[in-house]
Image (tube, helix red, strand yellow):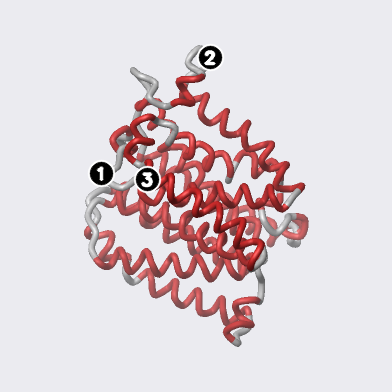
Amino acid sequence: MKTSRKLLLGFYAVVPLVMAIVAVDAALFGYSLRDSLPGNPEAVRLFMVFFVLPHILASLTMYLDVQYLSRYRWRLLLGIPTLSAAVFVGSAVVGIVAVAYLYMVATVYHVVGQQLGVSRMLAGRTDWTYSAWKWSLLTLGWILYAELLAPGFLGTALGLTSHEVYAFCFGAYGATTLLGPRILRLATSRLGKAYVVANQVLIGAIGVASLAGYPFFALLMPRIIHDCTAFAFYVPHDVNRNRDVRHNLFYRAFAAVPIPVAVLGPVAAIGAAYPLVEWSRESWTGDQVVMTLAFAHYFMESFGWRRDSLPRKSVELA
């Protein structure tokens, strides 16, 4: 089973779709949809059940592999307990709100960074301009997310109005487009070039939706693209890795169940997400557990998909 390059690019269709909804709502319905939406899609229980948590759980399940546990055991044995202690002890010392802000910073790096990492992989050939472009967009992502999740906080800290913060963002965004021609010239595939453009457009759309007062959509677009992209890699990985021999302990335990690996993994992740979402809604402890799982996911993804990693050997692009 292969990961389709066209499918990865196709996920970005959510951007023009969402922006069309924004335009229609503003032009024809007097912002009625905007006024009825919550500020963050993660406030919707079902959204958390089908997005956000499932891909985190699926990625953690991937490491229940005998060879992976052997290769990465010291990183996992040291990293995960450290992250767990940081969340729970940090919440007690500096407060869960401070830990939540750190979680936001890490989430932006992970969500936007993943898409830019895939972009680099599809582009093929890059140089320093790509790194400059990537870190510029990541910085813009942090600023926009800060303005979305804590309106006015960043501007107050810097002595700027909200409009001045957005003016800076759009000015900096315009500057990043100047790096585009060289990046596109170096890229060795047409789909890779299109993927670079798609990421540039995504960051711009987040800014436009945020400025127009649609934080729900500004946060929704990258989340849908990120999670769908993740499963586009996880599912083929799990199928290929466990085709002849079930190396993964989870899939081995369910070997007698007549459900294909490609279906079992996502369904199990969604099923496990539901009680976690309910728990996180009912107690701070549930919130801390969810943040711990997310941090563990970010940590494991930081080394799990490098070029020479074991998971990469079970994934092939088509």
Residue shown at 47% from the left, 16% from the top: 255
User: Residue 2, relative to residue 181: is it above or below?
Assistant: above
Look at discs 3 and 1 and give the one toward the viewer.
Answer: 3
Check disc 1: other Cα within 10 Å, few if <14, some if 14-19, many if 20+: few
> Spatial distance from mark 2 to mark 3, Cα to Cα?
32 Å
Kind of residue indicated by mark 2: Val
Q: Which residue is mark 3?
A: 74
Kind of residue indicated by mark 3: Trp
Look at discs 2 and 3 and give the one toward the viewer.
Answer: 3
Q: Quadrant of the C terminus?
A: top left
Q: Which residue is mark 1?
A: 308
Q: Residue 32, percent across and down?
A: 77, 58
Q: Relative to the observer, which residue lies in front, 200 or 254?
A: 254
* Circle 1 SS class: loop
Q: Relative to the observer, which residue lies in front, 153 or 293?
A: 293
**Which badge, 3 or 1, comes first in the chain's sequence?**
3
Residue shown at 38% from the left, 47% from the top: 75
- Residue 130: which quarter of the image? bottom left
User: Are circles 2 and 1 on residues that touch, CB within 8 Å?
Assistant: no
Check disc 3: other Cα within 10 Å, few if <14, some if 14-19, many if 20+: few
- Residue 35: which quarter of the image? bottom right
Q: Residue 279, percent across and down?
A: 72, 43
> Spatial distance from mark 3 to mark 1, Cα to Cα?
18 Å
Q: Residue 37, percent across and down?
A: 73, 55
**Which badge, 2 or 3, comes first in the chain's sequence?**
3
Q: Residue 219, percent across and down?
A: 59, 57
Residue 280 left/right relative to 70: right
Residue shown at 46% from the left, 42% from the top: 230
